[in-house]
Amino acid sequence: MSYQGQPALALPEAAPRLSATESYLRVLHALMLRDMRTRFGASYWGYAVVVLWPCAHVFMLVAIFYLRKVPAPIGESSSIFFASGAVPVLIYQYMSREVMKAVSANRPLTYYPQVKLIDVIIARLLVEIVSGCLSLIVVMAILVALGIDPRPAEPFTAVTGFLAAILLGIGIGTVNVCVMAYFPQWALGYVLFNIVIYITSGVMFLPNYLPEQIYAIFKYNPAVQLIEWVRLGYYPTLDVQVDYFYVIMFGLTSLCIGLLMERFVVRKLS
């Protein structure tokens, strides 16, 4: 309407209503951005440090054995042998540890009605999956720069082994979230537990060279079979039998237990 010849005022257009899926994706996007900025700082260098930290871990191990001239138990390249063992274990351990810390670091966000505990966990998972993939790419790029061919003899076997490491990290990390709800000291306990797993998983040796009775016990550790899975991609003649079903079901079962505990136990404590 207009009065005394004055033009009518234009009413502001209503903001378009977002669907439930679009709203949820925006929440996840905001959580991921906040997670990256609070953990890594406002610059790209902070995120680069997190991506390069596992790479430094891998190459420190490789450098120690290279300088000591320790030969690889199999194959011609000691760098490939140690990297093929360290990378899948580090992917699983870093992912499970960072997912465990997600809730304690972002608990105040759950006071907003749009943000649920599971959203915080999913956002941290997505950030860690991207970081893990970037770390793997950087490791391979550095090996190429050093004149070492990082391509596995059977790429499908190696890639599925890395994916299984991601699945195991997601599953164990989700369970750790629920354990932390009851025992906050588990953050330190899990670090010590991971040291034992790292030493005994076969990063620096071949477990199948151990006595049969001891090797059979070691096989219950999914990290041992993860390493053997990836190494089969690089050394197809390696004399091991990987229980693929056991590793995948271990990860899926852990994930299901963690999600059920989050739904029926942790939410009631919040």
Image (cartoon, helix red, strand yellow):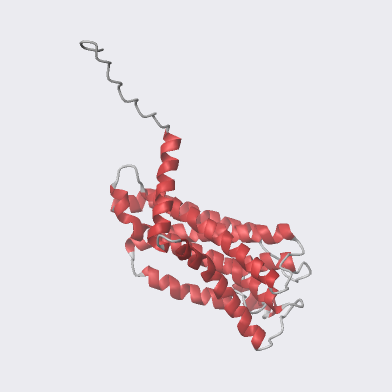
Which residue is found at the position 60% from the left and 76% from the top? 59
115 relative position to 68: left or right: left
Q: Residue furthest left?
A: 4
Q: Which residue is at 20% across, 10% downward?
A: 4
Name the quadrant containing residue 220: bottom right
Residue furthest out toward the front: 5
Q: Nearer the viewer, residue 171 or 132?
A: 132
The one nearer the camera, 69 or 227, is 69
Quadrant hosting residue 181: bottom left
Q: Residue at the location (45% across, 65% down)?
A: 46
Query: In the displayed structure, would residue 36 be above or below residue 26?
Result: below
Direction right: furthest residue? 237
Relative depth, front residue between 253 and 181: 181
From where the camera sits, is residue 221 visible?
Answer: no
Q: Which residue sits at x=57%, y=68%?
A: 89
Farthest residue in the bottom direction?
68
Residue 22 at x, y percent in the picture? 44, 36
Is 167 on the left-hand or right-hand side of 267? right
Residue 124 located left or right of residue 72: left
Q: Quadrant of residue 17?
A: top left
Q: Position of residue 184 (x, y in %)?
A: 33, 66
Place of residue 224 in the rendered image (x, y in percent of width and height, measured from the top left): 61, 70
